[in-house]
Amino acid sequence: MPVKRKSGHRVQAKAPNRFHELVEKSADCIGMADAEGQLLYLNPAARRLLGIDEDDDLGERSIADCHWQNRAHGALEKAFAALKRAGSWTGEIRWQGRDGRQVPMIVDAVVHREAGGEVSYCSLIAHDVSKLEVEIRALNQSLESRVLERTAHLHAAHSRLQEEKERAQQFLDVAGVALIGMDLEGRISMINRRGCQLLEDLEANIIGKSWFEEFLSEDERLRWFRLFREVVSGRRGHLDDGEIQILTSRKRKRLIAWHSALLRDAAGRIVGILG
């Protein structure tokens, strides 16, 4: 594109007549720069955003003058050199608006070359995404607020559940008999204080252990485990009541009277056994 000069100063280049009206009335910022990054043209939308009056000569203004604090760090010069090598670039940059604020822009830039391959000029179209950025920030804040609120509700629910669990454990602990809960694999999931005394160990050491492998004598183990599997699979209605010989954590044998009940969830499915 030809560039007219007066007294050594660069002047505003004219967009081709065919696209002049479209470019001039576009809400997006459209501009051109020479191979050195000196501005050749800015449409009215770009001038308004950057605070450059319509009649102001672009003079020696460069692409760096449009960008937020990029000139001092040399980042823009490197980016412009990369653009000339690649031939095109799309991404987000920040311009410095009329009032000095940062303006986030989505930019499409293209390099135009002479027949011999030399860079003739570069053109760009930039869209102001300030409103979108504000909306995204507001959405993020809303999501963060909802997550915090949900977390607070979950924490409160967990606290209530923990309190109920502790109250239930207190009721179990004051019972005069040993109470032992097992999951569907026969692992101990709950035990009261009397049960810990019976098995001669701490609750923390007992929970998670297999009732059949760890606390039934070898003579009793196979028979009771087979009955247990029949019950939890639904093939048998309940475990037999009666006497069982158990082994404590100290490997001492004890004879106990055993009675059990099935534990079910809200849908009626068996979830364990309480003995």
Image: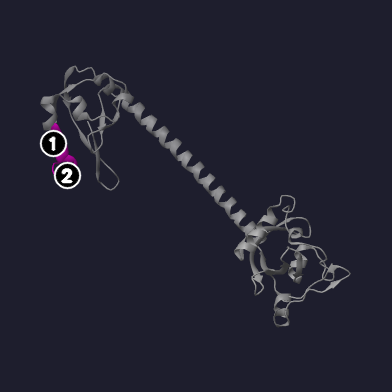
Q: Nearer the viewer, residue 189 or 162?
A: 189
Instruction: Name the residue furthest bottom.
Output: 18
Mark on residue 234? Answer: 2
Tell me the kind of residue under disc 2.
Gly
x and y percentages locating residue 85 in the rendered image = 62, 62
How far apart, in angstroms, are the residues tagged by discs 2 and 1? 11 Å
Q: Nearer the viewer, residue 261 or 127?
A: 127
On the picture, is 162 further left or further right than 130? left
Q: Which residues are magenta?
A: 224-236
Q: Rate crowding at label 1 as few (under 14), some (14 to 19) or many (20 or more) other CA atoms within 10 Å.
A: some
What kind of element bears circle 1? Answer: helix
Q: Residue at x 17, y 44 (%)?
A: 234
Q: Which residue is mark 1?
A: 227
Q: Using the image, determine if residue 217 lies above or below residue 271.
A: above
x and y percentages locating residue 55 in the rendered image = 84, 71
x and y percentages locating residue 74 in the rendered image = 71, 52
x and y percentages locating residue 112 in the rendered image = 66, 71
Residue 56 visible here:
no
Tell me the kind of residue under disc 1.
Leu
Work out whether mark 2 precedes mark 1 in sequence or the reverse, and give the earlier one.
1
